[in-house]
Amino acid sequence: VSPTVDVDAARELAELTRAIEAHVEWLVASGATGVPRAERPSAPVVAAQNPPEMPTNERPAPPAVAGPVVVSSVLPLSTVPPASSAALTVEPAAPAIAKPPALEPAERIRRLELLAESVRSCTRCALHAGRTRTVFARGTGASGLCFVGEGPGADEDAQGFPFVGKAGQLLDRMIEAMGFSRDDVYVCNIVKCRPPDNRKPEPEEMAACMPYLKEQLELIAPEVMVALGATAVQGLFGTSEGITRLRGRWKLYGGRTPVMPTFHPAFLLRNPAAKREVWDDLQAVLRHMGRQAPKR
Ligand code: SF4
């Protein structure tokens, strides 16, 4: 076996392991408590049917399929270990809550506009003092996919839209690579006003702004969300864990919306080698949506 084949096989095994792990995490997030245990009945004794005079080395091979697969029991998910050593981090570990009935598009747009109007005049936290513009969202969300970031930077503050600077351009390339149009993906942030010197928003600033995001997400009702960076995960789930540990592991927002945490595009601009991990995470999102990235 050549070293190239070994490397390819190891990569394939790693990808398969990650896919199985993501699927188990998603099952837990969906409230599943077990998976069917598949068993096959014993293989029929084929050798006894061969002519006795036929030499052993000329006998036909026994059939590859020994019998139909039988679901004999349910294997509790608690007995399925995660493929890596890190524990499952699905939050909250509760059955998924049914989605409320979808609003008529015109009504949804009307409510989003009203909400954006409230944000424009908001003074709930100290960040209002330094903003040029509030930054509410971009995109329609028609794809079912929503990205949540941290907060506006200088470019976003100047233009009034999220992810329009260099990190935003990288996010657009990621969205395109996934096979979505930029405008069909909903993009928003935890806080709607730019923190001074691009610092991380304080916990009280995030808490003050979260009701806006909560209402946005209720109106958009995305099928799947991607949390970009540790602050986005912290805002959505209140966790203080680092993104290196969180990324690639499904979480559940509001009891019904799966969220994939991954690195922020600004981090990728400084650490391009991490693009591989982000692409793995985005492919898990595509698999969940029953899609595949277009061939490039
Ligand atoms: S960051 Fe949010 S809560 Fe704070 S002033 Fe801006 S809109 Fe209001």
Image: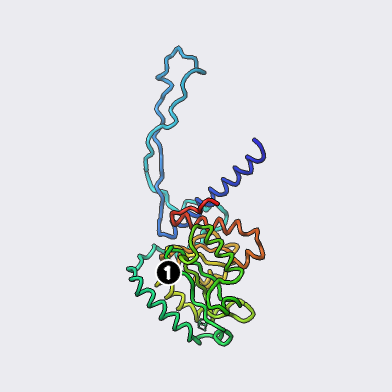
Residue 81 drawn at (x, y percent): 51, 52
Residue drawn where x is 59% and y is 42% of the image: 9
Q: How many marks?
A: 1
Answer with the quarter of the image where residue 43 lies. top left
Q: Is residue 135 left or right of residue 2?
A: left
Q: At 66% across and 62% down in the image, what residue appears?
A: 271
Which residue is situated farthest in the top direction here? 53
Determine the secondary structure under disc 1. Answer: loop
Q: Height in image: 215 above or below 264?
A: below
The residue beneath circle 1 is 254
Check the image and report above or below for 170 versus 150: above
Quadrant of the image containing the N terminus: top right
Q: Quadrant of residue 73?
A: top left
- Residue 178 percent across, percent down from the top left: 51, 58
**Along the line of sight, which residue is nearer the eye, 80 or 61?**
61
Q: Is residue 257 visible?
A: yes
Asked if 203 appears above or below 241 in the picture, the reply is: below
Q: Is residue 93 visible?
A: no
- At a point 60% along the width and 62% down the height, the residue shown is 244
Whether the residue under disc 1 has CB within 8 Å of ligand 1: no
**Residue 18 point in image, percent of width and height:** 54, 52
Q: Position of residue 283 (x, y in %)?
A: 52, 55
Q: Counting other residues with Cα less than 10 Å from the Cα at mark 1, is it few (<14), some (14-19), or many (20 or more)?
A: some
What colouring method underlies this structural image?
rainbow
Residue drawn at the location 43% of the way across and 63% of the way down? 143
Check disc 1 and give the amino acid type: Gly
